[in-house]
Image (cartoon, rainbow, N blue to C red):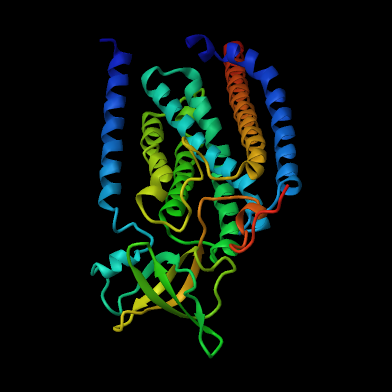
Amino acid sequence: MHAYANPTRFLAIARPLTPWLLSFGLLLVIAGAWAGLTQVPGDYKQGETARILYIHVPAAWLGMGGWTSLAVAGLVQLVWRHPLSGIAARAIAVPGMLFTALCLATGSIWGKPTWGTWWEWDGRMTSMLVLLFLYAGFIALTHGDEGQRQGGSLSRGAAIYALVGAVNLPIINRSVVWWNSLHQGPSITLRGSSIDNALLWPLGLTLLGFSLLFGAIVLMRMRRIIADNRVAARLRRLADDEGAIA
Amino acid sequence: MKAKHQRLVLALVALVGVAGAGVLAASALRDEAAYFRTPVEIQGGKATVGEAMRLGGMVAAGSIKRQSDGLTIRFVATDGKASVPVEYKGIVPDLFGEESGMVADGRMRADGTFVADRILAKHDERYMPPQMGEMPKNMKAPKA
């Protein structure tokens, strides 16, 4: 595990992996969107509006998956102090927030024709909005802080914040079960799917596609932070050398 | 015990504690955080006349009656255990219909009718192609 915490070893893997994730991700998203929009029938009741699920569900999955990995990175930072964990957490926060916002936006666009409202304060919507604010808080907490100038590690406060924020994840997941809500119950559970197979298969494509894209974005952002660190280190060395000459 | 093991145990204990507090808070909120009340809760005395609230339930089959003014509808909301008559004047969402879910904003009237100011359609978790779903009950599946 420690082997991959070394930025140089990490880059040796991340560099060739990024274009693969990016191109396969794009390919799958385009294929899934095309299939979802043209190849499957509309829903028996909602008609064409149901097709937004091919974006909405992956966005929700990545918004929540993003915070899960953020919390794991926070734990690794706190306990093992891996040099890469803070960099990973910083890299995850922005795309995680982006996908959470995408989930809320697509849900709202779907809610108007389906429910008859853009927004209601039910358990699912409120807890998902809290996740968006948690991301915003994490970015505000870590952007331009001491750690960013010193290699990207998280402060103890930011790492604890990432861990504590994970408490919201089971609440989002269970919100439609614990409380009666406007949002429907879970369609896909361990027992199976109440989305008919005829409508389900493009979701697999977009789910995997967006996940690969998410991975590509995170790797790109991590590489960028590492590159910034190296530039800063080199500038410091240059300044020291000039100081020595003068 | 090494320092990092100490930190791991500390972090996990703290996480379990915070998660436990979250679950406790959520379960304490159970009734308060509910988005709507069901007919059985309302008939169980959880509703006072004139108090603003939301009622959620299924629209009973055959219960939608349009009144003579052309705008007001009456129907029965049910949760399988109890049912409440609802009166609403206005436009309903496209997905509003019999044997499907709805949520109404409004208040109870003294005669036991729920007077709604606004109606939302509630969608369930099933998604399927048209030929499997909206098959009229008096029609048999086409032969292959």
Q: Residue furthest left?
A: B45
Compared across the picture, whether B39 is left or right of A20 comes to left
Q: Quadrant of the N terminus of chain B?
A: top left
| Image location of residue A59, percent across then percent down | 58, 42
Q: Residue at x 28, y 53 (%)?
A: B29
Q: Residue furthest bottom?
A: B69
Q: Quadrant of residue A44?
A: bottom right
| Image location of residue B132, percent across then percent down | 63, 52
| Image location of residue A18, percent across then percent down | 68, 24
In the rendered image of this protein, does residue A219 appear above or below residue A60? above
* B96 vs A89, nearest the viewer: B96
* A100 vs A230, nearest the viewer: A100
Q: Can residue A98 be seen? A: no
Q: Residue at x 31, y 37 (%)?
A: B19
Q: Quadrant of residue A206?
A: top right
Q: Quadrant of residue A181?
A: bottom left
Instruction: Report how many numbered discs are placed on residues in the image.
Output: 0
In the rendered image of this protein, does residue B110 appear above or below residue A61? below
Compared across the picture, whether A155 is left or right of A21 comes to left
| Image location of residue B80, percent across then percent down | 37, 62
Q: Can residue B84 be seen? A: yes
Q: Residue at x 51, y 22 (%)?
A: A151
In the rendered image of this protein, does residue A242 appear above or below residue B60? above
In the rendered image of this protein, does residue A230 appear above or below residue A137? above
* B129 vs B1, nearest the viewer: B129
